[in-house]
Structure formats: C-alpha cells, structure tokens
C-alpha cells in the first residue's frame, strides 16, 4: 500500500535539513519502546518445502487472469534431465510459501568451464509467471517483481537467493551455459519462514465446506504475513502498516494467538511516531527500525488505539497497555484538531493534511467514513481507558461521541433515503454506511436500512477490495444482519477460492481480475494480510458462520 | 580459449561412469603436488581504485570497434545528483582493473520503501558497454558477459558484487525504484586484486616512446592476469591454460619475478594430468583444484616442459624441477606415439586424437607447426635434462631431434621456395615457418629466407592473433632479423595502443576490429595474458628493443 502526497514529500525533504526525524521521540520512552520491540522480535520457524511437480502456464479465459497452471510432469523428471536441454521450466511448490530459495546444480558430463546464467521468476499466481514484466507500466518500484538474474560461477554448486521470496510458482530459465559440459538441477528447496508456531483447532466437519475452505486459506494468508512483524504482504511492502496490523491482530486473537507479535508491533509504532506523537502509517524494521517519515495516514493512526484495546482484552497485559496509553490518548488530539465545536469533521482540511485511506477506490469521498471512524476510535479508546482506569484523563469523550453522532446525522444522513451521503453530488458509498454503523451512529434498524439500501443502490460505490470488505462484514454483524454477513463472506472470499486462490489477495473485484491500484496487476500482492479476516469472523462468531 | 572435440566429450561422459577422473593420479605424488600448489597459492594484494569520471560512449567510425569513451563529467557530479534523475551513467575507472566492485547508496529524501533494481554492465573496452548483449549470438556461455541485475532491498546500503569483475568502464542503469524517495550514489569503489607485488624497473627515457608505451601496457596486462594462477584473461576463462602460462612466465621472469606463481602452476598442472600422465590444456582452481577432463591440447602439454626448463633457469630451484621431471619426461611419450621411425609426425592421427591449437586461424594446417613444436620440445626437454643431470634418461633425444629435422626438411620443406608447406594445396603459413625455425630446423640464412618469403607471400596465412604473433617475434629474433622483430612488435602491439588499448587483447587483427573466435566480439577478452609478451622481448633483448 503506497501513497505519499506531495506536501508530505516536502515535509520529508525539510526533515533532511533539520536533522534526523527519528533522533528524538515525542514520547520520553520512545527509544526504550523500540528497544523493547526488538527484544520481542520472534524467532522464525523454518520449514523446508520441496516442489510437488512441474507445471505449464496455459491460457484459459475461464481461469483467474486468463492463466492456469497445468501439471505436466513430476519434479523427479526435472532432476533426471539435462537442464541445457530443458532450458526453461515452471516449478510448483504446491502452496504459497514465504522464505528462501535454493537449488543444487550437478554436473552430468564434462567440467563446468564457464558461468551459468539463469533468470528465476517467482509468482504467487499463474499470471505472474506468464506476463512479461518489461516494459514495466506500474507505479511502484519495478524491483518488487520477483525476477532475479543470477550468475553461477561454478557447477556443482548450491545457488541461494539472498532475497526473501513469496509465492507458489517458480520459473527457471537458462540464459547461458557452456556447451562443453552439461548439468542438471538436482534439488530445489524452499525454506519457508513464519513466526506462527501453532496450529489452531480445525473447524468442525459440520461447518459448511466453503467456510472451512475460506478459513483454511485465511489462516494460510495470515501465517504467511506473520513474520518478524505483521506484514501487509510477504511479496510486496513486507512491512508493518497500522490498518493491516489491526485486522491481522484480530484474526490472530482467534487463531494463532501469537500475542507477542502484536505487542512488538504496538511498541514499534509507538517508538517511531512522527514528531507530534502521531502514529505513522508504516514503519520499517531494516536495517534498523525506522519510520517512513511523512507517512501520515489518519485512519491507521486511529486504528492503533483499537488494536491496543483489543490486545489488552485478549491478553490482560495491563503493563503494556498502561505504558502505551499516552500514545492512544495522543491520537485523540488528531480528532480535536479537525472536528469543530458542533462535532463535524473538517474533511477538506483533514484530507489535505493527511492521507485518508479507507479503501482502494477511485473517487471515493471519505467525509462520512472519517467522521464514523473518529467516533469508532473515541468509543474504543474510551473502553480502553475504562479498562485501565484512565477514563478521567479523557473525560470529555462520551460527550464528544454524542456530539459527533449528532453532527453526522444532521449533516451527512439523508433520512429520506436512510443513507449517508457526502461530497459532490451527494455520493453514496458502502464506506460511508459502514463506518457510520461501526461508529454506532445509527440504531440497529437504521443500520439495516442503510446497508440494505446501499446494496440495492446501483450507483453506490462498492468496496474496492478486501480491506473495506472486512469492515462491511463487521457492519453487517453489528447490524444483526447475520445471514447477509455469512452470504457476503462466502460470496466474496469464496469467489477468490473459486478462482484458485492459495492465499487471499490484496485486491479483489469479482468483475475485474486485472484491477490494480498500481496500474500493473502482477505487482499486486496475492497474499495480503488484510484479506485474512474471515478467520476472525468465522471463529469469533461461530453462531453465524459455523452453523 | 575453448574447444572440446566431440570424441573428447565422449571420453568425458565415459569418465562419469568409471568414477572420478581425478581420484587417482598417474603420478604417485600427484595428490601431494596439488597440495603443494595450494600451499604456494599467493595472497593477493588489494588496491582500492576510485573512478576518474563519467563518460559517454560515442559512435566514431575511427575508434576501435566504432565506439569511443568521451569524458562528459566529473565523478563528483554523479555523487551530487539524484540517481532517480540520472537513471543511467557510464563510469570510467581510468584504467583496466580486476577485482570487486561496490557502491554506496544514500537517501536524499524520503524513506526507501521498496527495493531498487539496477543493471550493472562492465566493459574492458567501450564497445562492450555500447553493444546489446541479447539476443546473444556467441558460442561461449552468455554468462561470461559482465552484466548483472541486482535488487537492493534497502537504502542506505552498500551494494557489493560477489562476482569478480574485469574492466575499465561500468554502466549503471536504474531499472526500478520507489517514486516515494530519492537516492544518490555516494561512492563507487573497485578493489583491484593481483598477485603482483613488485614494480619492475622503468625503461630508460632513451627508449623509443612507442616501446615504452607497449611495455607499460604489457606489464599491466600481465599484472591483471597474475592472480592465484596465471590466468589467460581476467574477464573470461579466468584460469590456467598451459600455453598462456608459458608466455606469461617468460614475461614474469623479466618483470615481476613472481616465480612462486610459476611454481604453483607447474605443480597444479602436474597434479591434475589426465590418466595417462599427459598435462591437460587447462585446470580449474575452484571449488577445489580439478582438471577439465578430456581437454587434451597437445601444444600446451609440450610447453609445460619448456616452462619448467625456463623456470629452473630463472630460479635454480632444482628441487621443484627434479620433482616434476617425470612429468616432463612423460610428455615426450606423446611425441613417440605420433612420430614414425623416419621422424615424421602422423599429423592426421594427432589432429584427430588431440586438439592442436597453435592459433585462432580458420583453415590453418598444423602439420609443419606440430612437427616443429615437437622438435622444440625435445630440444628444451633435453636442456632441462642436462641441467638436472638426467640426460641419460632420455638418451635417444638428440638423435630423435636430428631425425625429425631431417624428416621435416624432406617432407615439408619446399627448397625452391625456401618455405615450409603442408596440407591440401601445399598451404603456406607463418605458423609453419615459425615453428620450424623455433625447432631449429633451418639455418639462420634459411630462416631469414623463409620468414622474408612468407611475409612477401600474399596468400600466406598470417597469425590470427597475439599468441602466434609472439612466436613470430621470437622466430625473427632467433633468425637474427632484429630490425624486423622490432618493427613488427611496434607495428602490431603499437596498433592496439593506437586503438586505445589499456591492456592487450586476446584477438587482434589490424584489419578487423570485430574478429571473434566465439562469433561475438564483446565476449573476447581484452586483457589477455598471451598478449603480454612484449614485456619479455623488450626486457630480455634490450639490444634489440631498447636501442
């Protein structure tokens, strides 16, 4: 997930001249928090994975993105062959893995008297293997694409890629070798890594097959993204983003229960805020922990508070929650900065000064959504304060919530239609309804009305991807629309299953396989944390999803 | 230098099924010899080289291979620039170097939030940078070409290429980077390596400028090739070949005097012969010392003996020479195997069962050359035996020499023309005259006649490259044609100097810049040991070359 506004860049440039942005933390304990996060860094489990066979990418208009992996031979057939003859092959590791690739090369005859050159291309989905990467039309760095050219000076040898790889398929193409010898690939190995070390309970056999499949793939997705932080996706970005963390930590609470990872991420984000103490959208672990200066992402700052509250509720780790309470409290100041005395957000200014993400959806007006999220944040932060006995420190919040709900209804709610509207032409979107419902602005009946109306509204802007879709499911549940929640989850995530997903995707629009916020679908992440949420829903609400 | 005949491949395939070809040596001490060679492995000196500026490769029909490196900016201008703006640049290190490349990357603004992808292309000559490598039309492994694609996961960082590089120019092309940050290259470094640790005396100022230039470039060429063995070329092959070693060790005796390197190479070749005890054309150092099975190169086997003799003469290291004497003696059996009772070589059979190299020259008949080289080998080996007091062990050699000279004159010499001829259509070549003269077949007067005649003969096959040209210079000297030797050396090697050579080339035909034995001129080696011989001639024969 990427976006940095121009004015943020200017701030970042200014930061160079004013010295390191991370030298001093807003919080007196900021540095210790980063150190604590480092102490909490998990050891990764390693699992050696062998390929299951050779495939060919075959064009098929009914397959996802037009390409299907068709099994053509056993892996042993590769190990028995001259690779100078084979020249190019696609290996299938049988499932999605994240980790380190190596292959052993052995001489068949002669002596390797020159280097061997390969191009190795890794893909999470078949089309990534079949689509040429160059000339590269995408917005994000071309270097995320997982193709590497390697020169191997001697055979026999073991070729190890230093770069961590994420995917299921690997194309090996021979770009050069001496004609005076021959060699074969004698072993292919993928050392898969994850910080998950627990297998959650299987769902009962009685649970709908589709739900069990979705749960299994959701667990896989989450596991792949749980590394030394909650990554957004193991192929691309590969780092901690606040909103992704929120959804991952929810799913983790109901599955792998690796709470230490959540704790680590909370400390990392707390230790690496901006100079105002606002939690940044994303931070990096390497070469040492550091923030993405200027990455002010308002919704992600708020979700920090909610994550901390849910963490405390799941673990009773009061020590951590107390230590980080000042951070949560500070995030509320963002709300104060943008909400007028009548409780209405100054959307224009907020949207200019921050990145309001919410969804990959062109043209989405986020006025109602940010108003709703602010209320949601106030609610959750107040609950956190109550758990910590700190409600006195944010006494005004209950009144603030009331005022903001009132302002929302007054300014953004079309009573007649039973829908929230905002922006030019009174835009109607799922996002607006969802976040107002999560903010508790509507009664159960009004919520049901709004969600039903938006689903029936042909022009309504629907969720652009699984991130917003997750909040949609939650809004349905909150509105006691359990059947709809279940059928929407099965329809949406089941759609990815039907299209052959091994892990759930960053971007999924049932009507367009090629949708990419980055203008080149192979750069999309096909194992993306924010898409793992069925694990949370299915396991938190068995009465809805496990019937 | 590469050639493996088909029948050799079959031998090599057979070798797989009969176990390792190197498991047992023909010589009882073979294994110890390899161990001794390893003990003699030199520590390389390291010199850190910084670039001298930025160049642009400009088309120029008068320049070597049509491309000229034109200085366009200082290196500091690169260090001061955004590399996202620069995108592509050619760096000039000011001279040819062999070693390891690294570059430091620094952030200018923002945070590196995605990997950076570069293509780095190294070239010994300008055209290597300017010529697209793909689709690759050459015979040798494409992987020798020095272009590497690297993915750099974080900035700041130091990018180090593991692969050893050889060249003067380096193109850095940016293939991908995040648009949300910028970076610059803050340092470029080339850690040059060589086993040369001595600077030979400068030639007197009185020496012809052209000769001094040729000597300087010859020294540079030799130094670049002197690594942990005498390499043929530091860009390509990068390994010990017997014939290359012979010429390098001669130049070394008169310049760097690193006799230990010669000693190491003699032990390596002795410890890694074929199963018959014949010295192979080439051996490898990595991952552990091993021969190129089947690389039976008759002229190179013979030159082993000559190298050993010259090594002894230069060092008085009788211990080594005595220990390796059985190897030299054994090589003479090759001669016995192919020479009939009248002293004439069975060229057809020899040419079928071995690779007779002599020169990169299409269509060259090597009958006279191999007859001459055999005599040269007998002479030199007998001299070696005399120095070691072993002449009794090869008593028959003096008679054999006489018989072979006689057979040569009788069967291959055209008295009327004063030229050696061989093969279909009585082919006349420099190679035939040269090797017969080096074998002492002709009197001084006859030698002068033959060389003069061949130089005046329009259809005579002239030397294909510096390897044969070196023997030509020696033949001129041996024939007391000193002026001609000097002018030929100045003309030939000076021709490379005039074309901008930093080091002397593997292949040089004054009339064709694009000549390549491998059908793609960028794969040629432009720093090639066998081209360093002016160092030897100029310094061994000051009365000829330093007047």
Image: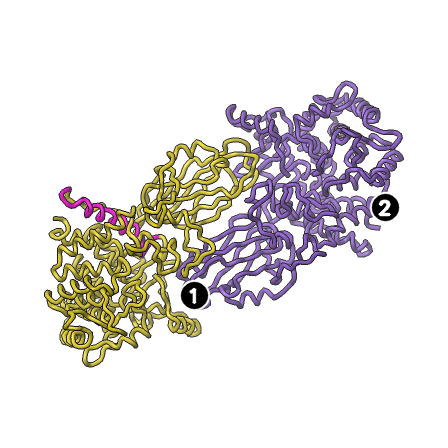
Chain colours: A yellow, B purple
Extreme residue toward the front, this view:
A458
Residue A298 or residue A429, whichever sits in front: A429
Same subunit: marks 2 and 1: yes
Horizontally, is B378 left or right of B54 in the view? Answer: right
Tell me what residue is drawn at x 60 percent, y 60 percent: B51
**Marks 2/1: CA–CA distance:** 65 Å
User: Where does label 1 land, which residue?
Assistant: B181
| Residue pointed to by mark 2 | B483
Nearest to N terminus: mark 2 or mark 1: 1
User: In this image, A454 relative to B405: left or right?
Assistant: left
Coordinates of residue A421 in the picture (x, y in percent): 21, 71
Pointer 2 chain: B
Q: Position of residue A419 (x, y in %)?
A: 18, 69
| Residue B159, position as x, y percentages in the image | 49, 55
Q: Is residue A515 above or below residue B528?
A: below
Front-lying residue, B17 or B424:
B424
The region drawn magenta spans A205-234
In percent of width and height, residue B303 lies at 70, 33
Q: From the image, which quarter does the N terminus of chain B lie in?
A: top right
Instruction: Let me know if residue A539 is in the magenta part.
Output: no
Query: How would you rate the neighbour count of disc 2 (Cα within 10 Å): few for under 14, some for 14-19, many for 20 or more?
Result: few
């Amino acid at each position: 997930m990427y976006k940095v506004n121009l004015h943020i860049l200017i701030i970042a440039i200014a930061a160079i001249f004013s010295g390191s942005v991370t030298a001093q933390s807003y919080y007196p304990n900021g540095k210790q928090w980063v150190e604590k996060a480092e102490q909490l860094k998990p050891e990764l489990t390693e699992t050696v994975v062998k390929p299951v066979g050779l495939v060919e990418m075959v064009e098929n208009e009914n397959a996802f993105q037009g390409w299907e992996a068709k099994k053509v031979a056993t892996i042993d057939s590769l190990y028995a062959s001259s690779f100078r003859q084979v020249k190019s092959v696609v290996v299938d590791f049988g499932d999605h893995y994240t980790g380190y690739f190596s292959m052993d090369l052995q001489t068949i005859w002669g002596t390797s008297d020159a280097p061997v050159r390969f191009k190795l291309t890794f893909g999470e989905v078949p089309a990534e293997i079949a689509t040429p990467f160059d000339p590269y039309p995408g917005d994000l760095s071309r270097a995320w694409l997982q193709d590497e050219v390697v020169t191997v000076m001697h055979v026999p040898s073991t070729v190890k890629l230093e770069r961590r790889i994420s995917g299921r398929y690997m194309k090996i193409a021979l770009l050069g070798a001496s004609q005076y010898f021959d060699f074969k690939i004698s072993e292919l190995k993928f050392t898969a890594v994850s910080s998950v070390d627990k297998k959650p309970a299987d769902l009962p056999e009685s649970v709908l097959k589709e739900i069990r499949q979705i749960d299994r793939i959701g667990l896989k997705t989450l596991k792949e993204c749980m590394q030394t932080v909650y990554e957004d996706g193991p192929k691309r970005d590969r780092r901690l983003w606040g909103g992704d963390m929120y959804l991952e930590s929810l799913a983790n609470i109901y599955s792998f229960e690796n709470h230490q990872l959540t704790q680590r991420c909370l400390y990392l984000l707390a230790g690496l805020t901006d100079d105002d103490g606002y939690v940044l959208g994303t931070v990096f672990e390497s070469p040492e922990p550091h923030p993405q200066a200027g990455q002010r992402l308002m919704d992600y700052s708020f979700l920090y508070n909610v994550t901390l509250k849910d963490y405390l509720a799941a673990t009773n780790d009061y020590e951590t929650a107390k230590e980080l309470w000042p951070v949560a409290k500070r995030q509320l100041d963002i709300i104060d900065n943008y909400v007028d005395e009548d409780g209405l957000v100054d959307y224009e200014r907020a949207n200019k000064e921050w990145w309001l993400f919410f969804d990959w959806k062109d043209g989405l007006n986020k006025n109602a959504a940010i108003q709703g999220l602010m209320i949601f944040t106030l609610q959750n932060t107040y609950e956190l304060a109550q758990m910590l006995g700190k409600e006195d420190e944010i006494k005004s919040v209950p009144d603030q919530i009331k005022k903001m709900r009132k302002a929302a209804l007054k300014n953004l709610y079309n009573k007649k239609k039973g829908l929230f509207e905002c922006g030019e032409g009174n835009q109607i979107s799922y996002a607006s309804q969802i976040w107002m419902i999560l903010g508790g602005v509507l009664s159960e009946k009004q919520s049901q009305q709004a969600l039903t109306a938006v689903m029936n509204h042909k022009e309504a802007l629907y969720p652009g991807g699984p991130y917003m879709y997750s909040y949609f499911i939650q809004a349905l549940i909150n509105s006691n629309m359990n059947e709809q929640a279940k059928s929407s989850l099965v329809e949406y995530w089941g759609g990815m299953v039907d299209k052959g997903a091994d892990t759930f995707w960053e971007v999924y629009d049932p009507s367009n396989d090629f949708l990419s916020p980055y203008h080149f679908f192979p750069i999309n992440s096909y194992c993306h944390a924010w898409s793992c949420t069925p694990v949370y829903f299915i396991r938190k609400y068995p009465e809805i999803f496990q019937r």
